[in-house]
Image (cartoon, rainbow, N blue to C red):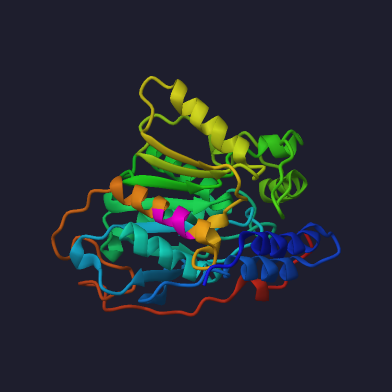
Amino acid sequence: MSVPKPLVRTRLAMARPVMHSTRVSLGAKRTMADSIASAARAPEGAVYDFDMIAGLPIQFVTVEGAGPATGRATMIYLHGGGHVVGSSRAYRAFAAHVAKHSGMDVLLPEYPLAPESPYPAALDSLIGLYRSLPAYGVDPTTVVLAGDDAGAGLALAMALEIRDLGMPMPAAIGMISPWLDMSADVDRARPAASDPWFTPALATRWARTYLGGADPRDPGASPLHGDFASLPPIVVHYSGLDPLRTDAEAFLQKVTAMESGPRVIAREYPEMWQSFHLQAGRLEAADVAIEEFGTAMASLVEVPRRHGDVVPINRPVAGRGGRRLQLVRPVALAGTPSV
């Protein structure tokens, strides 16, 4: 059953005072962020599992009836939350919609968050994850890097780092409401918008927390300042009410100005808020958007149709001795300072 758009907006607006308060603990904010992200209602046939790769807890999400034997690619999806809140567990139902519409298996890493682990901890750990994929039967050239908000920025930063390290490039990149330029936030230059809960002030606070003194124009933290040459195709969805809209627009401007930039499929939703896709299964507009996102991602990936070309990380792999399942500790349970 679809929830009316005004009601969803009202619920998100109710979260704003809590997320912006300096008196509320970070643990409480993480719990609230998880409750917002987990509002999605999973499609029929969703399957969840757990594993560890390169020291990172992983949520594995797929949909019954279409596995690796059909030639599915693997999407590493990085949750949003400004590098400070958010968790892979809260994204499971949403990721099932992504898996359904993209035809891919989705891996949700529990990457390190600030202030406990400031930049570049998250990027370094995710590069380690990517480097480990072949040992789990996953061909990096059939991998898609995707995410929303801070996760989208991390996906693009990963691609830049992978290229610069000379590693096999992913097949494509997907970004929803991408956060790509923290220098705008550190400089308090991000324009205001009409998002129901996310504001430039919050972006400034989270950017400074994440950077921990690092250069806000470092492409690893703000990939908008990087070189986009030799990147794979990219899908970008952005929303008109989102303060981060300017990052997506600047990204598109920069790519358009390149003589031989990556192919980009861009979609703007003028009357929607940041990462509204997360309300999939509850909000009709989110259902339409995530179907468009998944279909666009699938169109950019060519996967060999031979059995065994892509093996989910938590299924038995020859020579690996079977799977190792470990429960993920919710980030909200960790003792944390107030941010």
Residue visible at 37% across and 57% down in the picture = 75
85 shown above or below 61:
above
Residue visible at 58% across and 60% down in the picture = 112
Quadrant where the C terminus lies? bottom right
Count of all numbered marks drawn on residues in the image: 0
Q: Is residue 218 magenta?
A: no
Q: Is residue 339 visible?
A: yes
Prevailing SS of the magenta stretch = helix
Q: Position of residue 156 (x, y in %)?
A: 47, 43
Q: Quadrant of residue 187?
A: top right
Q: In terms of depth relative to the viewer, which is nearer, 330 or 10?
A: 10
Q: Is residue 54 visible?
A: no
Q: In terms of depth relative to the viewer, which is nearer, 84 or 3?
A: 3
88 shown above or below 240:
below
User: Left or right: where does residue 170 sit relative to residue 32?
Assistant: left
User: Left or right: where does residue 29 sit relative to residue 55?
Assistant: right
User: Left or right: where does residue 183 sit relative to residue 281?
Assistant: right
Residue visible at 65% across and 63% down in the picture = 8
User: Left or right: where does residue 7 sit relative to residue 56?
Assistant: right
Q: Is residue 290 magenta?
A: yes
Q: Quadrant of residue 122?
A: bottom right
Residue bounds of the magenta highlight: 287-291
Residue visible at 73% across and 38% down in the picture = 186
Q: Quadrant of residue 16?
A: bottom right
Q: Position of residue 97 (x, y in %)?
A: 42, 64
Q: In terms of depth relative to the viewer, which is nearer, 226 or 18?
A: 18
